[in-house]
Image: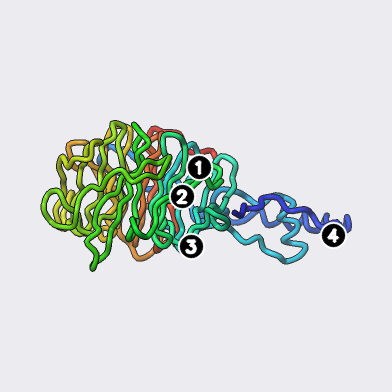
Amino acid sequence: MKTLKIFNSLPTHLSSLATGTIILILAGCSSAPVLPKIDPPVYPPPPAQPRYIYEATLRSSNNISEPTFAEKLQQVATGSRIAPTGLAKPYGVVAHNGRVYVTDTQQRAIVMFDLMNGTVKFIGTDGPGKLLKPLGIDISKDEEIFVADNTAKRITVFDLDGNFLRAFGNKNILTRPVGIATDPTSNKVYVVDTGGIESENHHVLVFDGKSGELLKTIGKRGREKEAFNLPLQAATTSDGTLYVVDGGNFRIQKISKEGKFTGNFGTIGRRSGQFSRPKGIATDKDGNIYVVDTAFGNLQIFNPNAELLLYLGERATSGGPGRFSLPAGVDVDENGKIYIVDQFFRKVDIIRPINSKPFEVFQ
């Protein structure tokens, strides 16, 4: 596991004259031209009353920490550059108490942005918890991180600081694990197995998150009401209800905590409330459902009755706040802030409720 080093030591061979010259250079650099301020996007846009506002984008360590004075001196004196540490090909995201955990399939790791301390840490890069292709990620009621490893065909568990705890599942049980959700009312963990085109294993496996015991299997491959076709991601509500993105059927499946199908919503189409390529899903404390659609390049928010409330973001070929090309994972934290991953632009956009307090690191 590797951690971003925030402080570097100042070279001891610098003379006082050189140091004074460097300070003057740094002072001169501080008077850069002031660029015009761009108002952040709000949702819904005017003239409607805004409910959400774009807050920030996470790509690398540069987004949450400034170089120290010593680091600036070192850069000027030696010509060296402090390389930022960040995202390469992000997929899933979960946020908790000021930390944002993002799975990265190219770097085979979880990238943790600690917004309170201005640090970035890589989790799962070595040892028994080494990750091969991490995709879905969630945090349990006991504050343990569960990760679906698509290549290793197992679920890997870490504590909030990234220390490996245990792993369960194997290739005899899991075909292509892609999504994961933990039950806030029990130790159950739901693993979405997308199977693949030639596989019949399109289902959700229910494990005991402590022992790793397989408890039951939900669903089968098909297009009928109680079936899946290329399921992708999953999320739970506070009462234990499970929502699963049924990608190939262009719908969201609703399943009770007892494992029974209780309904679904969504159809294929290009209108608001329909789906073209649904992928990521999250819920909030009020039971609202947040669904990322990769083809639309946006996030649609539904109430517990599956009625569309609004959508956030837009599809774009160039990056920018609230602009997406290949959005994937999504999460909503305890304060209602929304975190949306975009694989193409290698970022996580943070969108907060209009009346909420922004993180100090972005102020």
Q: Give the amino acid type for the residue marked by disc 1 in the picture.
A: Arg
Name the mark nearer the viewer: 2 or 3: 2
Q: Which secondary structure, mark 3?
A: loop
| Label 4: element kind | helix
Secondary structure category for the residue under label 1: strand
Name the residue located 33 percent from the left edge and 55 percent from the top edge: 173
Residue 228's place in the image compared with 344, above or below, is above
The answer for how far apart the CA atoms under marks 1 and 4 are is 40 Å
**Which residue is at 50% across, 39% downward?**
98
* Camera-nearest residue between 91 and 36: 91
Q: Which residue is mark 2?
A: 167
- Name the mark nearer the viewer: 1 or 4: 1
Q: Which residue is mark 1?
A: 99
Tell me the number on the disc at residue 314.
none
Name the residue type under label 4.
Ala
**Marks 4 and 3, the one that precedes in the sequence:** 4
Q: CA distance from mark 4 to mark 3?
A: 38 Å
Measure how far apart labels 2 and 1 are at the Cα level: 22 Å
Local crowd at mark 1 within 10 Å, few (<14), some, or many (≥20)?
A: many
Mark earlier in primary sequence (1, 4): 4
Q: Residue at x 22, y 40 (%)?
A: 259
Q: Secondary structure at mark 2?
A: strand
Residue 18 image label: 4
**Contact, mark 1 vs mark 4 (Cβ under 8 Å):** no
Sequence order check, earlier mark of 4 and 2: 4
Q: Position of residue 65 (x, y in %)?
A: 60, 48
Q: Which residue is mark 3?
A: 88
